[in-house]
Image: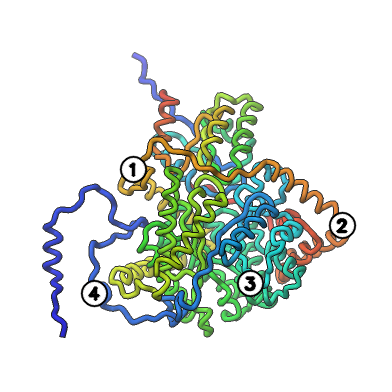
Amino acid sequence: MSPAVQAKPLRIVLAKVGLDGHDRGVKVVARALRDAGFEVIYTGLRQTPAMVVEAALQEDAQVIGLSLHSGAHMTLFPAVMEELQKRQATDIIVFGGGIVPEEDISELKKQGVAEIFTPGTPLEQIVGWLRKRFPES
Amino acid sequence: MRVKYADPDAWQRAYDAAPKRDDRIETSTISGIPIDPLYTSAATRDLVDELPGQYPYTRGIHPTGYRGRLWTMRQFSGFATAKETNARYKYLLQNGQTGLSVAFDMPTLMGQDSDAPTSRGEIGHCGVAIDSLADMETLLDGIPLDQVTSSMTINSPAAILLAMYLVVAEKQGVSWDRVGGTLQNDILKEYIAQKEYIFPPAPSMRLVIDSIEYCAREVPRWNTVSVSGYHIREAGSTAAQELAFTLADGFAYVDACIERGMQVDDFAPRLSFFFDAHIDFFEEIAKFRAARRIWARHMRERYGAQNPRSWQLRFHTQTAGVSLTAQQPELNIARTAVEALAAVLGGTQSLHTNAMDEVLALPTDRSARIALRTQQMLAYETGTANTIDPLGGSYFMEALTNRMEEEAEAYFKRIEEHGGVIPAIEAGFFQKEIADAAFRYQTELEQRQRVIVGVNDFINEDEEPLQILRISPQAEQEQVERVREVRRKRDAAQHAKAIESLRKAAQSPRENLMPHIVDAVRAYATEGEIMGTMVDVFGLYTEKAII
C-alpha cells in the first residue's frame, strides 16, 4: 500500500510593485490566502518587476499576485510578464488586484495576466479562483 | 410644572418583548463600538455645559460656527502635467471653489524626478508631476497667491515643494507674510499607514521641525503640518484608532518642537489636522467632537499653552475613498453626501468631497463638478450650516463622544508603554493594529454581517461602464523632456553651489535646512537632486513587512 499522497500547498508570492505604498488590500488578501491553507510570501513595498520575479524563483512559487493602486498597472504588470519571459519562468501564473479599469483588464489578460480582481471582490472569490486553477493543491 | 411621562422600565419591557429583525446585520458601528437601541438622559447625567468658541471646544472652535464663515470647499486635484492641472484649477475656481489643493503624482511624492527609471508608468497618474521650480511656475500661473490659499499633500519631500511655492510667490511679488496655505508634511503617519517615507524617522523629523521653525519666522500664515488621520483610516483603522494615532502624532511634533527649544505658543497655532469622514454617520461626528476636546485639554494642561489658538484643533476633512465602490459607481454620490454631512455637523474647517469615479481613476471634469456641487447643496440648500453643533446635547452623540475620548486615551497609554510614537512605529505596533482592524472588517463583510450596497447585496448584474479620465502617454514623455530641458538651461555654477551648501547643512545637525533648500530651488535644482543630496547624508528607510 502506498502512503497517502500529501498535496503540497500552493506557494504564492504577493508583491507591491512600483512606488505605491497602499498596502491594505495586499495585506488582507495575504491573510485570507494563508488562512485558506496556501503558503504566502509577501515581499513588502516598492518592488521592481525584476525583484518580484527573482523572489518567485527563489521561493519556488507557482503564483505571483501583484497589487497596485497608483495607475501604473499598464506599465508595471506587462514588465513583470516580460521579466518572466526573460527568466524562462512563464509557467508562473500572475494575477493582480487594485484600481484597474475594465478596459485595461482585457488588455492585461491579452498580455498573459491570468486574472485581475478589483476593489470589492470577496476574498472567497480569490481563494476559489486559485483552487480552481490549481485543483491539486 | 411639566408632567413626567417617561417610564424607562416600561420602555425596556416593551422593547424586550417586541420582535426584532433577524438579518444578522451588525448593530455596532463600522469600527465595532457597540451601540444601544436607545439613549436617554441617563447617558448625559454627567454632561457639563459646553459652548462653541470656548474651551475645550467640543462644540467648535468658532463662537459663530458657520454663521461667521462657511467651511472652505477645497477639492484635491492634480493630474498629468502642470499645464493641464493649472487649467483644472482655473475651472474649479471659476465654479466657486474657494481654495486649491494640490495632488502630486507618485514620483513627486517619493522625491524622484520624472526621468528616473522607476518613474516609468507613474507620471501624472495619481496627481500632477512636479520636478522643479519651472513646473511649479506653470502650475500656479495666473493664480494670485496673495488671494488663494493652497494645500499641498506631500510629506517626505514637503520642504522642497514648500520652497518652490514660496519662490513662485516671490516671483509674483507677493511677500511671504501674505502667503497662506497648508503643507501636509506629516511624516509620522507615513511610517504608520501611507508608507511614503524615504529617510529614517530621526532625520525625517528633523526636516519637519526645520520647516516649522522656518515658517514660524518667515511665513507666519502658513500651516506647517497637517497632522493626518485620513491615511490611517483608509489603511483600515477604526475611528478611535484614527483619532488616537493622529493626536499622538500631533503630540509627538509638539514634543519635538519643544525639544528644539521653541515655545509651544510660537508653533502650535499653525498645526492643523486632517481627518476622514467615513460612512458610519454618528461615529464620525463624535470623532470630530472628541478630537477638539482632547487636543484642547492636552495642549492646555499637559503642555501649558497659554494662547487659545494653541488649544483649538482646526481640521480639514475628506470623505472616505475606501467607502466608494466600483460597482454601481453613481451610488458614490450619495455615500459622499452623507459623509460630507457628517463632516459639516462635526464642524470641519474645510472639506474635500470625493467624486464618484475616484474608485476607478482620477475624476473627470463632470464628476469633479458634481462632487463640488454636493458641498454647495449642503451649504446653501439643507439648512445644516445654520445652527452650531446641532447634535450637541443629544444623548447618543454625547455618549459616543465620551466613548471616543476614552478609547483614544487608552491608546495614548499603550503608545506611551512603547516609549512614544517612533519606538511604537519601529515595533510595528500601529501597523499591526491597523492590519488587524482591516482584516476584521473584511471578515465581517465576507460573512455578510455588514452590507455594502452593490457589492455584497443589491447587486446589478449588467452595468454600463463610466466614462473615466485617461492620462495620455504623451504627458509622460513631455514631462521627461521638460525636466531634462531644465537641467540643460539652468546656471550650472549656481546649481552646483546650492547643492553643495545643502549637503554641508545636512551634515551639521544644528543647521536649519530650509534656507538651503530654498536656494537650491531658486537655482532650479530638481526635486530628485535635492532629495538625492539628503539621501546621501541621511540614508534610506525600509520597513519590515508585517502581514
The chain containing the residue under callout 2 comes to: B
How far apart marks 3 and 1 lie (CA) works out to: 46 Å
Question: To which quarter of the image does residue B64 belong?
Answer: bottom left
**Residue that badge 1 annotates:** B458
Q: Please say if B519 is above or below A48.
A: below
Please name which of the two marks, 3 or 2, marks the residue nearer to the observer: 3
Instruction: Name the disc covering residue B227, or none.
Output: none
Residue B486 percent coordinates (x, y): 80, 53
How far apart marks 4 and 1 lie (CA) works out to: 38 Å
How far apart marks 2 and 4 lie (CA) works out to: 72 Å
Mark 2 surroundings: few (<14), some (14-19) or many (≥20) residues within 10 A: some
Please name which of the two marks, 2 or 4, marks the residue nearer to the observer: 4
How far apart marks 3 and 4 lie (CA) works out to: 44 Å
Q: The disc labelled 1 sits on which kind of residue? A: Phe
Indicate which disc, 3 or 2, sits on the residue closer to the N terminus.
3
**Front residue (pair B461, A68):** B461
Residue A41 relative to residue B47: left or right: right
**Residue that badge 3 annotates:** B180
The chain containing the residue under callout 3 comes to: B
Q: Secondary structure at mark 3?
A: loop
Q: Please say if B302 is above or below B201.
A: below
Question: To which quarter of the image does residue B263 belong?
Answer: bottom right
**Residue that badge 2 annotates:** B492
Indicate which disc, 4 or 1, sits on the residue closer to the N terminus.
4
Kindly check if marks 3 and 4 are in contact, taking CB atoms under 8 A apart as contact: no
Residue B500 relative to residue B215: left or right: right
Question: To which quarter of the image does residue B446 belong?
Answer: top left
Q: Are marks 4 and 1 on the same chain?
A: yes
Q: The disc labelled 4 sits on which kind of residue? A: Ser
**Residue that badge 4 annotates:** B41
How far apart marks 1 and 2 lie (CA) works out to: 63 Å
